[in-house]
Amino acid sequence: MLSAALILSLVPTGTFPALSASQLKELRTTKQNVYLPGHVPKGMKANVNVEVSKEDKTQTYYQVTYTLGKSKFTIQSASEGIGDVFLEDDKGNGLESAYQKVKTKPFGEVEIEFDKKTKRQFIVNWIEMPKKQMPRYIAMFGSDISLETAKKIIASVRRA
């Protein structure tokens, strides 16, 4: 059950919170499917990075990182070959993991791997897009965010 404080700290919107119109336009220039959270904690700021191959316009990459203080949530996509996302501490050491499932509209049920000790670091490793869309894969990860807040953000992800 979500606490009243958590519910009040999330920003529901018909648009995509923390993104400016120019950032959203930049993401849409890829002419690929873009997925973003419909809810993020109030006050988070977004940083957008988009790359499109000059040789093959179907080979795209985007990353949107939302930050507030030390809290961070990232959603990224890739057409191919970017490598796995790992649950690690600041020194690159693997963390003891636990898993929970979250239902999302575009991807169905996804598995969140999280730091079993603190429950404040998590990943959703590469999800293959339905119907072989481009980009082909989406990953999400974050730190200094509670597991309950992470689940709410991930559940809110939808096509932009």
Image (cartoon, rainbow, N blue to C red):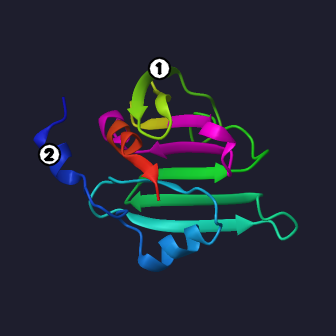
Location of residue 41 (image quadrant): bottom left
Residue 88 visible here:
no
**Residue 85 image offset from top left, x and y in percent:** 64, 38
Q: Which residue is most to the right?
A: 55
Q: Which residues are magenta?
A: 123-150
Q: Is residue 15 left or right of residue 3?
A: right
The residue where tag 2 is placed is 5
Taking depth in this image into account, of 127 and 86 the one nearest to the observer is 127
- Estimate the spatial distance between the alpha carbons at disc 1 and disc 2, rounded to whole Å: 25 Å
As drawn, 1 above or below 81: above
Taking depth in this image into account, of 122 and 118 the one nearest to the observer is 122
Q: Is residue 131 left or right of residue 14?
A: right
Three-letter amino acid code at disc 1?
Ala
What residue is drawn where x is 19% and y is 35%?
2
The residue where tag 1 is placed is 98
Three-letter amino acid code at disc 2?
Ala
